[in-house]
Amino acid sequence: MRKQRSVKDFLLHNFLGIYAVAVLMLWMKTYIAQTTQFELGVEGPLQQFLLLLNPLGSALLFLGISFLFKGTRKYTALVMIYTLMSILLYANIVYYRFFSDFITIPTLMQTQNFGDLGGSVLSLLKPYDILFFVDVFIMMYLRFSRKVQKETKRIGSKKAAAIIAVALVISIINLGLAESSRPQLLTRGFDRNYIVKYLGMYNYTIYDSVETAAASSRRALADSSDVTEVINYTESAYAKPNPTYFGAAKGMNVIYLHLESFQNFLINYKLNGEEVTPFLNSLTKDENTAYFDNFFHQTGQGKTSDAEFMLENSIFGMPQGSAFITKAQNTYQAAPSILKDRGYTSAVFHGNNGSFWNRNTIYKAFGYDHFFDASYYDTSAPIDMAEYGLLDKPFYEQSESLLGSLPQPFYAKFITVGNHYPYAMDQSLVTIDKAQTGDASVDDYFQTARYTDEAIETVFTRLKEMGLYDNSVIVLYGDHYGISDNHKKAMGQILGKDITPYESANLQRVPLFIHVPGMKGGINHTYGGQTDLLPTLLHLLGIDTKDYVQFGTDLFSEEHNEIVPFRNGDFVSPTIDSINEKFYDNRTGLPLDESQLERAEAMKKEAAYKLGLSDKVVNGDLLRFYTPKGYTPVDPSQYNYTKDVDVEVNE
């Protein structure tokens, strides 16, 4: 009994005992969360051991900060640190449920987006989530209960140093074992999954903070010599235009129609025998429309903003956060500014707040003449509203007069929100039944996709009636996936097959339609991604891209590079795919034959080099050091998107 009492006394009446309880609870909770809430692709006993080990070092170290405090304040500090670490863990769990990714420091800076998230976040919460905070309540009880005698004397420096030393030793062993399993883990950190798998959630946060600080310092340290390597690369990678298509749309208007969260599997897909997207299906057969069935989104954490960033600049989005948020003050040579020198007026139409994704700032750096945001639209009717703004049909209808006011030729982009997670829609507006997988996100997805398809059809009809159809390039593009990897079981039912990593990578296809009056269309099997859109469009307009810093190549060019890098360093191509550090034969989906591994490694190195150069351009703001021949740099201060001031200032 005396021994039992002494253990109990140590645990509840001694600060080191409560510290030990806190470490044990946080360690176990984090390990359980990492194994059950994230799909980290853990394989083999070493990775399993590292997943168990990495929360221990972090818990010992971070909770050990409480040793710096005196008296009862050390108990308060312990509880506060414990609570903050629990909140960090849970925030990543919720974030991962939709994005299949982890929070970074730059994403936390996207605060102007938070006000519009509403029901999207609520739909991600689970009844059992309260269990992630039971231990927090226990810690609060231990802090404030009078039954627990508080130790007021300061922790001895030797004891504190010994515990911190143990924490550091565990962390060093963890890092050493991780490096032995995954060499250059920290220097090749494109994929956050690997950092979390090998080093743990809390060490990942430290890594992310260091990377964010380093990225911020790169602009200050950059100079004109840094852009030389980039220009040498883009000049060597330049793909000459195909004479058949070069200038096929010269002088025409350009209209981009944004297909929110639209994956390519929807095209020609039948749900219960009924076409989900009948109008888009018809475009695959249109003689003047090129439909690319191997076109992939390349977005990262910036999702829609990344898609816009790439199609406007042919530069990759950031490995962390969104360039729209963190790099809005950079110098860009985007499509609107390039076309301005050719007499084009440019405009964006979007039925949401102009501050969402910081659009009302970065569009000025792109050189957009007009930004028609929610302030230009009637958003008073609840049935016309989606969670992220005006639904597609009233949005397009109300945009008609604004489009008609633009001088021709114009470059216009319409950003829709109807097919946005969580895909909830008033049932009086739907024209197709839900799927029946039992997964709400997947089941509802088909109704909002059908609604978008119907809205697109009305756009084509009205463009014909307005006399714009025969003199406009119309580009329809999907921005990113709609159904994340967290819905594999339901997607397996929809597609009738298991969603393996190979299948998941190929589900990142999004639609791309390019309609040009008089151009020979058809289904094009070329592999490409969103960075390829700008050079493709410019060549169609008869503008050569060889003097511009662009990381994509013309999809119609015979010299087009068909290696499509993803933001995490993976890639797909017509022959070889690289997915989660494994190579697959693209034609069979099977692991790659050893005889082709050398070629696969070379392709992976090429993709990583391209991503690295693109990051140098964005982090260092390198385009401020280079101006292509005949290009007029943008002065963002000359633009004002405020209603009633916009047209007067920007014309």
Image (tube, helix red, strand yellow):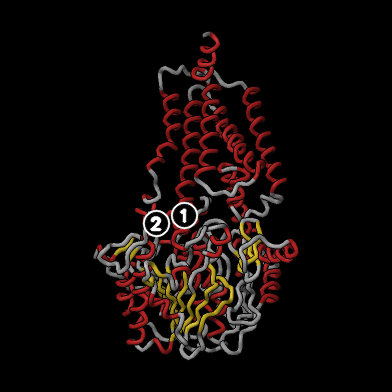
| Residue at horizontal 44 percent and vertical 62 percent from the top | 494
- Look at label 2 and name its amino acid: Thr
Q: Is the C terminus in the top left, top right, bottom left or bottom right quadrant?
A: bottom left
Q: Identify the element where label 2 is drawn.
A: loop
Of mark 2 and mark 1, the one earlier in the sequence is 2
Q: Quadrant of residue 60 in the image?
A: top right
Q: Residue at x 27, y 63 (%)?
A: 427
Tag count? 2
Residue 465 rendering spot, x and y as whole percentages: 32, 87
Judging from the image, what secondary structure is the residue with disc 1 in? helix
Q: Is residue 380 visible in the rendered structure shown here?
A: no
113 to 338, vertically: above or below? above
Query: What is the crowding at mark 1: few (fewer than 14 residues within 10 Å), some, or many (at least 20)?
Result: some
Q: Which mark is residue 437?
A: 2
On screen, residue 324 versus residue 611, left or right, reads left
- Residue lying farthest bottom? 518
Q: Which residue is mark 1?
A: 489
* Residue 420: image location, x then y, percent: 39, 62
Q: Residue 56 vs residue 649: left or right?
A: right
Residue 618 image offset from top left, x and y in percent? 59, 64
Regarding residue 490, the answer to whether it shows in the image is: yes
Can you name the residue that lies furthest to the top here? 2
Residue 379 lies left or right of residue 362; in this view the side is left
- Contact? badges 2 and 1 (CB < 8 Å): yes
Q: Position of residue 55 (x, y in %)?
A: 58, 37
Q: Residues within 10 Å of mark 2 (few under 14, many from 20)?
A: some
Residue type beneath disc 1:
Lys
Q: Which labelled disc corresponds to residue 410?
A: none
Q: Is residue 49 above or below residue 426?
A: above
Q: Compared with residue 315, is residue 539 higher up or lower down, i.e. above or below? A: below
User: Alpha carbon of mark 2 to alpha carbon of mark 1: how far?
Assistant: 9 Å
* Residue drawn at the location 51% of the way across and 16% of the way down: 8
